[in-house]
Image (cartoon, helix red, strand yellow):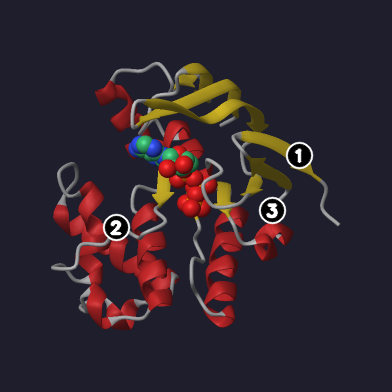
Amino acid sequence: MLIKIKNVTKSYQINKENVHVLKGIDFEVASGDWLTITGPSGSGKTTLLKVLSGIEQPDEGSIMIGDFHISEGEEEEKRNFRRSNIGYIFQDFKLFEQFNLLLNVMIPLLPYEKKEQIEKNAKEILGKVNLSHREKHQPALVSGGEKQRTAIARSLINRPNILLCDEPTGNLDVESRNHVMSILKDLQKEGITIILVTHDTELSTYGDHLFEMRDGLLTRKQYS
Ligand SMILES: Nc1ncnc2c1ncn2[C@@H]1O[C@H](COP(=O)(O)OP(=O)(O)OP(=O)(O)O)[C@@H](O)[C@H]1O
């Protein structure tokens, strides 16, 4: 599915002041491509992923994913669209501490599909990210890299064709970071479109297209 973003703006009201976070964002990503966006903290990367996924509404502009206007749909339509098409790896993992890793991966689909089927798929995905031996552990008992891979596994439970990754290697050491990036590469090989945002310029070697976000605007960068 082609992703097409045209002239998207977004501002937040902070202490009665309008802060313009996205100031006119335009780009396209073809199906199966990998787009990496680097940029300093606070430049608007997370906000961009939120409007892209329909979690937040842009002030202006349009976002089309395939032939769906995610910037215009009703909340329920957007939720259904997200569930069928988008995986989202959150910057802060958003794992439930009271549940084990298996249940954390299953949660997004529990209200919608048969538990046995979700469990089978969740186990398969946890295997793919090398976490089968940890599925009964709670998040507090596993490492940062294992938490990150759980977040990846959960983002895949709905078999998305688009994966939005917010700082997917956060504070990981080099070995864990390389592991996460090789998982993402394999996912792209399976045909998943990847949009990755990060402040870590070392990740700018990954992907087919590279942009830099600065002060709410995107510029295309060349790979060296
Ligand atoms: N819900 C919100 N309400 C008010 N301001 C917000 C909200 N979300 C983000 N902002 C502001 O928008 C700006 C951009 O934030 P955003 O999280 O998109 O940046 P970022 O590039 O992802 O930063 P980081 O790499 O630190 O996560 C920041 O100044 C932030 O304070």
Counting from the top left corner in percent of width and height, residue 124 is at 35, 67
Local crowd size for mark 3, using a 10 Å CA cut-off: few (<14), some (14–19), many (≥20) = some
Horizontal placement of 76 versus 212: left or right? left
3D distance between C-alphas at marks 1 and 3 = 13 Å
Q: Is residue 67 visible?
A: yes
3D distance between C-alphas at marks 3 and 2 = 25 Å
Q: Which residue is mark 1?
A: 220
Could you tell which of marks 3 and 2 lies nearer the N-terminus? 2
What residue appears at the point 72 percent right and 47 percent down from the top-left corner?
A: 210
Q: Which residue is mark 3?
A: 207
User: Which label sits in the foreground, 1 or 3?
Assistant: 1
Q: Secondary structure at mark 1?
A: strand
Q: Secondary structure at mark 2?
A: loop
Could you tell which of marks 2 and 1 lies nearer the N-terminus? 2
Q: Quadrant of the N terminus?
A: top right
Residue farthest to the right? 224
Which numbered marker is on residue 36?
none
Q: Does mark 2's beta carbon lie closer than 8 Å to ligand 1? A: no
Identify residue type, mark 2.
Lys
Q: Quadrant of residue 76?
A: top left
Horizontal placement of 32 versus 84: left or right? right
Counting from the top left corner in percent of width and height, residue 224 is at 86, 57
Could you tell which of marks 1 and 3 lies nearer the N-terminus? 3
User: Which label sits in the foreground, 3 or 2?
Assistant: 2
Local crowd size for mark 2, using a 10 Å CA cut-off: few (<14), some (14–19), many (≥20) = few
Q: Which residue is mark 2?
A: 94
Identify residue type, mark 1.
Arg
Local crowd size for mark 1, using a 10 Å CA cut-off: few (<14), some (14–19), many (≥20) = few
What residue appears at the point 15 percent right and 44 percent down from the top-left corner?
A: 111
What residue appears at the point 49 percent right and 66 percent down from the top-left corner?
A: 170
User: In front here: 140 or 105?
Assistant: 140
